[in-house]
Image (spheres, helix red, strand yellow):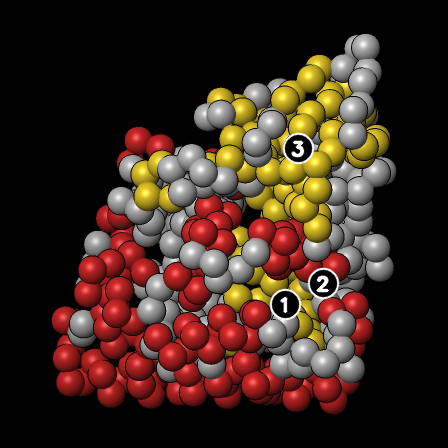
Amino acid sequence: MKRIIKNAQLVNEGKIYSADVLIEGGRIAKIAKGLEEADAEVIDIEGKFLLPGLIDDQVHFREPGLTHKGCIYSEAKSAVAGGITSFMEMPNTVPQALTQELLEDKYQIGAKDSLANYSFFMGASNENIEEVLKTNPKNVPGVKIFMGSSTGNMLVNDEEVLDAIFEKCDMLIATHCEDEETIRANSARMKSEYGEDLPIRFHPIIRSAEACYKSSSLAVSLAKKHNTRLHILHISSAMETELFRNDIPLSEKRITAEACIHHLWFDESHYDDKGTLIKWNPAVKSAQDRAGVWKALLDDRIDIIATDHAPHTLEEKDNTYFKAPSGGPLVQHALVAMLEFYHQGKVSLEWIVNKMCHAPADCFQVKERGYIREGYHADLVVVDIDNPWEVTKDNILYQCGWSPFEGETFKSTITQTFVNGHLVYNNGEFDESERGMRLEFDR
């Protein structure tokens, strides 16, 4: 099927310009003004912006094993409604993706159920280095190491194992960095004083900036020692930003970093209102930490923006501090949240596209995605930049049924999302007749 997206304002590769886009065979066939094709469906988006589909390098879609919270179908559906056309999902499911066979099981679910393009990280533990080293860099985004708390046995805290993985793994390693000993000591001290009624505002004291820096600096030192391709996820403290460079282009970096929506939007002043709904690991920290993460994003020490989408039920969240799980749903609202910063004059549309589309594609060497280019897969998002709407329970698509943004009015609306040329989301309606594709990597 041929489609022409007419009268688009393309936001791509540092420019905004007017053009039409011809889609044929699931790919971008031509970009030019005044395109005409007799047998093509025409979609006129005059007055709207056309962006590359977003690539989210860190989500937890909860399948298999935790599907009361969410599943690949429900959360991928929420993602495409938010303009995310490709995701990379984490291995801490049940069972954990610690063998090649268990990893492949997740790809089979993705092929069957995901409306977005999909990819799944291989998990590392203290015992599975042989399985880790079998991972194919051509069709798996990377190896995930939890250098801090995780479910089950995924905390990698054996120094010899860590060193061996960093030495022997010839593909990207992504890390969650929080020092477990520091967190346990802080937690014990606070629990002895407050018991189970510890106020949520102490979360960034327990999961402190110092805990993050100690772990992140260890990861960086190991990567430098072995020249490992390292990507540190969800940087949350100003202190950590000192670990990263901005004097070389992204294409030359061996060590890269990511910031997440919640660490850019919230700070510790929001705990009184939001409570455990904004309990994440790493923690939302001080206003100074939030400003430091922003500064590092703006000067390119931090390379990309992601979500760390991690749904839990409201029943699970409505608990005392130590019992309430960490994480929250974000994929449906990530782009519109970032567009608020555009409306505030903090960033440009081109900058948002770079951090959420181009840079993830470059960082992970995603094949033929992340840009609006002839020959690339037609992953595209249409944005009505001035069409306000309020987040309510009625329009939240996450299976868990809630959002930390509930009650927020966003100024911009995602009107259409194309995945591999297929119009999967169109003004609130879904066409689920096609599924996404497994991501491939140019490595």
Relative to 431, is 227 on the left or the right? right
Q: Does 42 appear above or below 275?
A: above
The residue depicted at 41 percent of the width and 72 percent of the height is 290
Q: Mark 3 Cα within 10 Å, few/some/many (few <14, many 20+)?
A: many
Residue at 41% from the left image edge and 49% from the top image edge: 329
Nearer the observer: mark 3 or 2; the answer is 3
Name the disc covering residue 83, or none.
none
Task: Give the residue at x 79% y 53%.
Answer: 441
Marks 2 and 1: CB-CB under 8 Å? yes
- Residue 428: give x, y in percent of width and height: 46, 26
Of tags 3 and 1, the one toward the viewer is 3
Q: Residue at label 3?
A: 8
Q: Identify which amino acid the numbered label 1 is placed on.
A: Asp
Label 1: which secondary element: loop
Residue where numbered disc 2 is placed:
363
**Could you tell which of marks 3 and 1 lies nearer the N-terminus?**
3
- What whole-number distance in Å separates the C-alpha atoms at marks 2 and 1? 8 Å
Q: CA distance from mark 3 to mark 1?
A: 27 Å
Query: For the point 67% across and 81% down, which residue is it?
Result: 245
Crowdedness near tag 1: few (<14), some (14–19) or many (≥20) residues, C-alpha within 10 Å = many
Tell me the distance, in whole angstroms, between the alpha carbons under discs 3 and 2: 27 Å
In the image, is 265 to the left or to the right of 71?
A: left
Instruction: Select label 2 or label 1 by which is in front.
Output: 1
Q: Residues within 10 Å of mark 2 (few under 14, many from 20)?
A: many
Rendered location of residue 315, percent (x, y): 24, 48
Residue 430 pos. (x, y %) = 52, 24
Amino acid type of the residue that numbered disc 3 sits on in the rendered structure? Ala
Dot 1 corresponds to which residue?
A: 303
Instruction: Determine the secondary structure under disc 3.
Output: strand
Towards the viewer: 402 or 362: 362
Residues at marks 3 and 1 touching, judged by CB atoms closer than 8 Å: no
Screen quadrant of the N terminus: top right
